[in-house]
Image (cartoon, rainbow, N blue to C red):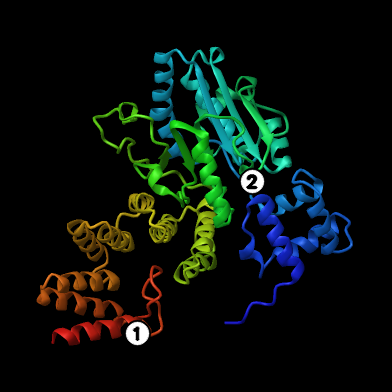
Amino acid sequence: MLANPPISPITAQAAALIETRTGLSVRARLHTDLAVILDDLARSLSYRTPIELLRVLRESDDASPAWQALIGALTINETYFFRDKGAFDLLSGHILPEIIAQRRRSGQFYLNLWSAGCASGEEAYSLAVMLLELVPDLPNWNTRLVGTDINTQALHNARRAQYREWSFRQLDPRLRARYFTQTGDGQYTLDPSAREIVTFKQANLLDGPPITPLDVIFCRNVLLYFGKEHIHRAEALLYEALTPGGWLVLGQAEAARFERDRWLTRVFSGVVLYQKPPQSKSAQWKPSNAGSIQWMETEKSAAPNPNTTPIASADYENAARALREERFDDAEREVAALLLQGSDDALLIARLRVLLARNLANRRALPEAHAQLDAAQQSVPLLADVYYLRAILFQEEGRAVDADKALRAALYAQRDHPLAAFMQGNLYAQSGDHTRAVRAWKRARRGVADLAPQALISDLSDLTAADLDALLCQQLGRLS
């Protein structure tokens, strides 16, 4: 592998400044496109050199033209209405109705919601439409719904509230007809009844919440691009901003990283939300259907989306390589970007979810890892890696019986799955059942027999076929 080229002092200084000011982690781009971005930006803004651009960045705030141009080059603002349908279904079907009912009983008619990193406004307006549907007397409530973003151009677009077809991929046609009016230029304008509910502000997430205390915070796919120090700080801010019992919605590829034990992690049919503990057990929020957390029916497969851009196999391999090399932050960002891009290839999406689950497991985010495996299993029921990784999670949780069942399922899905058979043999050996251990290890050897010696046996491991075969021979030799 060729060594990365040296990092120029200007690029390194710019990266440090960007991370300090915005929280955005750009270290992964030091060896690739950050220097190119700075050079192109200097020319487009008529600065003679990137050094002059860096001086201007140091002397100006993040609302200045130079900073806004840089932020626009570093961030992705692509979004659409009711993105992450599972989270919105959970919010509209269970969480918000319970909050609304509690407020009615107490005579306190207020709701506070925050869309952090709101981009061009679709998320914040989705919440506004949801409130209008849920609360017939909403004009009589003190409702504060704020969308914030560091990108002023994105906020300008949000305030215009005009959108094209691309923004309506997940929107119920009934809601589209009710709340949008088509204009002559192929755009749709949001009804004032929804627009008036939302206030937009230019702000960095690290500046703190625009209002408190909050009932619901949407902060999806923002922390993915932060460095560890800033993630820690942001999560603390989000926690403190919530009212007791309030809810945090992260992106489907994200998990709370720090002080996880103070959050209540809620997993509902593959959707993961975080709740700030209520003040008392009597206020503990519970699902309404006899305590079951599996509320929502399995969604029917969506029709193929002709607007989806195919995911290149090289992009998938880059994400898998980052995971194998234990570059977990890079792996998380790359997998998240591919999932956000979307694909009609159900198998590819399921494999991405397995990669993400492995990454989450490395962070000890086990409920979130299980949720990703649930989603992968739902779309591709016989993907052996799903069950193999599930077995690892069960084993880490001390659920030996469930781990055994998961390994059996993996070997049913793929008869000679090498890693599942290897793990099964190890578990049998630990329990003293040497006969079954030998049988499982021989099964694993059959699984690698047709692979090239240097071929990787799985996206979930850095073992080659030769490596695993050597381990298997060693294990078999001990019992012979």
One can see residue 308 in this view: no
Q: Earlier along the polypeptide chain: callout 2 or callout 1? A: 2
Q: Is residue 222 above or below residue 86?
A: below
Viewer-nearest residue: 358 or 208: 208
- Left/right placement of residue 438 relative to residue 270 reads left
Viewer-nearest residue: 233 or 143: 233
Question: What amino acid does circle 2 point to?
Answer: Asn
Near mark 1 (Cα within 10 A), the count class, few <14, some 14-19 or many ≥20, is some
Question: What amino acid does circle 1 point to?
Answer: Ala
Q: Is residue 431 above or below residue 204?
A: below
Q: Position of residue 294 (x, y in %)?
A: 30, 38
The C terminus is located in which quarter? bottom left
| CA separation in Å, label 2 and label 1 | 45 Å
- Left/right placement of residue 107 relative to residue 7 reads left
One can see residue 335 in this view: yes
Q: Position of residue 295 (x, y in %)?
A: 32, 35
Viewer-nearest residue: 207 or 475: 207
Going 79% across and 54% down the picture, which residue do you hit? Answer: 58
SS at mark 1? Answer: helix
The N terminus is located in which quarter? bottom right
SS at mark 2? Answer: loop
Label placed on residue 77:
2
- Left/right placement of residue 195 relative to residue 266 reads right
What residue did someone put label 1 on? 466
Q: Position of residue 212 (x, y in %)?
A: 55, 29
Label placed on residue 436:
none
Near mark 2 (Cα within 10 A), the count class, few <14, some 14-19 or many ≥20, is some
Going 43% across and 43% down the picture, which residue do you hit? Answer: 302
Q: Is residue 184 above or below residue 273?
A: above
- In the rendered image, which quarter is residue 270 located in? top left
